[in-house]
Image: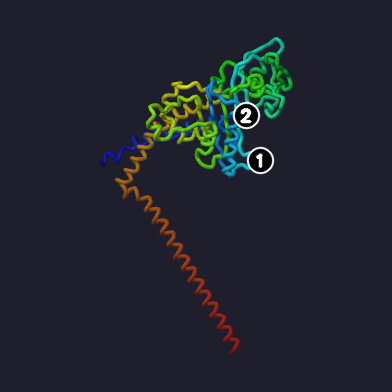
Amino acid sequence: MKKIFNPDKKIILIFLAIDIICILAVLGIILVSSNRVGRMFSEMAAERWENSKLNYSEVSLYYSDDAGITENDIQVMRSTIYKKLMDDSYVSPEDKNRVWIDSYCAHTVDTIRKDSNSVSVDVYLVGGDFFMIHPIPLRGGSYLDLENDDYNQILLDENVAWNLFGSSDIAGMKLWIGDRVFTITGVVAVSEDEEEVQAYGDSDCVYIPFKAYAKKEKNLMATNYQAVLPNPIKNYAKNIVAEASGINFKTDEEMKKSRSILNFSNIELVENTDRYKLPSLLSMIESHKYIDMRVNSVEYPYWENVARYIETRMIRNLNICVVLSIIPFFSLIYVLLWLLYRRKAALKPFIFVKNKISDKVEDKKVKRYEEKQQKKREEEARLAEERAAKLQEHL
């Protein structure tokens, strides 16, 4: 036992150096991960809406191609969400300030044309407050005006703009899709982050109002719906969206009876705001072992694919942090045991400090007492002098 708690100084220095390296590595991983999440504008809408009085949460729904929602479905969902918020006194008919926002989109592939030049692109058909939730940096012009009755607008990414026009300053120019003319409102940036480059793919991208395609496809279905709602308590916003979309969560008892923890449904609900926090990451470790298994046909837009990649990487980093923390953890345990084993020696510094403090306190007390007595003597001498002076005058 004495040998265990009296190690060689070289061994102590080696383990101290290892502990410092492990702790710095963990802090570095946490810092890098936090910075990457902070750059994901599509995942930070709730933070942009939060205020000192109320917390917010961003909730997303993703559908398979054959199970999407029409604009009529979206209006029904909006009515359900609005009624719940009104019942809970978060909105009122008289309130002109907006308390929540939402957006929806669908994805297709089409060919756009300028004169004799044409290019096949990924087309995102967007509606609602899409660009409030996805504030993609602009290179020129402006976002789509989704409240405008003129639906023939188009927003290009910078790759398309340079391929067709050789510039990003092209707002107001025209493009053709089939026999329809679209006016360019602006140009958005394309991220250079490696994971976003991979998720974006080889096809370039344009954004068009959902209603522009809904006119010719009456049953056009959105495969993504997102809402940013007040979230005064945990899962409040998530449960509102789930109820509005008809999703029924499994109870704990049903989860125990279920043979699989994976989602085989044609719809997925994601709570974006908390998905990168430690409790959520810990809860997802088990299911992420099977991340490569595709058990449904839900379609993810590129920004959700990026989010899932970051989520997976953060879970992997969490596992690394746990491993790196093992040595510092056991070092801490050893120090506590050493303090217990050699408590008298360990307490000497604390006792020394305590005695020093007690001595200083006692010295101050003595000094204050002496000063008080000195003032008392001076006061008595002054009074004696005054009495003597008065007696002298009387005589």
Give, as a three-letter code, the residue at label 1.
Asn
Mark 2 and mark 1: Cα distance apart in space: 18 Å
Judged from the image, the secondary structure of the residue bearing numbered disc 2 is helix
The residue depicted at 65 percent of the width and 42 percent of the height is 93
Is residue 224 in view from this perspective? yes
Q: Residue furthest left?
A: 1
Between residues 235 and 116, which one lies in front from this camera angle? 235
- At which x and y percent is residue 127? 63, 27
Is residue 131 in view from this perspective? no
Judged from the image, the secondary structure of the residue bearing numbered disc 1 is loop
- Give the answer, above or below, for where 279 lies relative to 116: below
The residue depicted at 39 percent of the width and 35 percent of the height is 253
Q: Is 337 on the left or on the right of 83, as rendered?
A: left
Color encoding of the figure: rainbow
Residue 99, by quadrant, is: top right
- At which x and y percent is residue 275? 50, 33
- At which x and y percent is residue 35? 54, 32
Q: Which mark is residue 97?
A: 1
Q: Earlier in the sequence, mark 2 or mark 1?
A: 1
State the residue position of label 2: 130
Q: Quadrant of the N terminus?
A: top left
Between residues 339 and 221, which one lies in front from this camera angle? 221
- The reply to whether discs 2 and 1 touch (Cβ–Cβ < 8 Å) is no
- Give the answer, above or below, for where 387 lies relative to 289: below
